[in-house]
Image: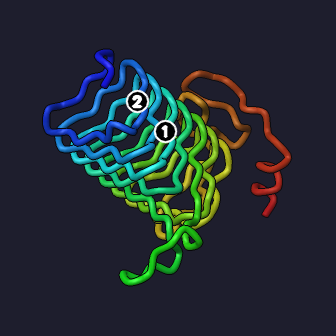
Amino acid sequence: MKTDIYLHPTAEVSPKAKIGAGTKIWHQAQIRENARIGKNCNIGKCVYIDFEVKIGNNVKIQNHVSVYHGVTIGDDVFIGPGTTFTNDLYPRAFIWNEERLVKTHVKKGASIGANSTIICGITIGKYSIIGAGSVVTDDVPDHALVFGNPAIIKGFVCKCGFKLDKNFKCNKCRKIMPISKKIQKIIEE
């Protein structure tokens, strides 16, 4: 293992996992074989990272999160405590094979609130925010604010994390977000 990462003595990390410089892995975390974790990440207590999971740079994963095989997490993502990702839409205890795997992508800068469940097969857009306790069953557009069960769009947020007003202006940093055709279509629906 590299000396430029921190591994708590109780963490269980496969020698086949790749971990970037500056990353910290805390109490009782388990990192499986061929998982790839980027630079300067913080992997909290009791986090489970399944085999072949890909995690970008500067990612913060809070305590008791499960990231299962088939999940890809981009750079600068925040994942709140107790969040669970799924990877099989029709799970059975007595059946598992790679054909059942359904992949999930979390894009750069997204934030997922505590105790959320992410149903597999979706993409969570750049700089979006998922409210605590949400069950996410559909794709989340870039910059969208979603919450609930099932999670639905309640507005849009700035890169700095604050909600945008009706003119897509952030009252915190004062920037105006350009409206993409995709977001315009969502607003009109």
Foreground pick, 141 / 22: 22
Crowdedness of circle 2 by 10 Å Cα count: few (<14), some, many (20+)? Answer: many
Q: Nearer the viewer, residue 84 or 125?
A: 84
* Residue 38 position within the rendered picture, expressed as x and y whole percent measured from the top left: 47, 29
Q: Quadrant of the N terminus?
A: top left
Number of the label disc, if any, that sits on residue 148: none
Q: Residue at the spot x=64%, y=39% of the render?
A: 165
Spot occupied by residue 119 in the image (x, y as percentages of width and height): 51, 65
Give the side of residue 154 with respect to residue 47, left or right: right
Q: Nearer the viewer, mark 1 or mark 2?
A: 2
Q: Which residue is mark 2?
A: 19
Q: Amino acid at mark 2?
A: Ile
- The Cα atoms of the two marked residues, 1 and 2, are separated by 9 Å
Residue 4 lies, with reference to residue 46, above or below; the image says: above
Image quarter in which the C terminus is found: bottom right
Which residue is label 1 attached to? Answer: 55
SS state under label 1:
strand
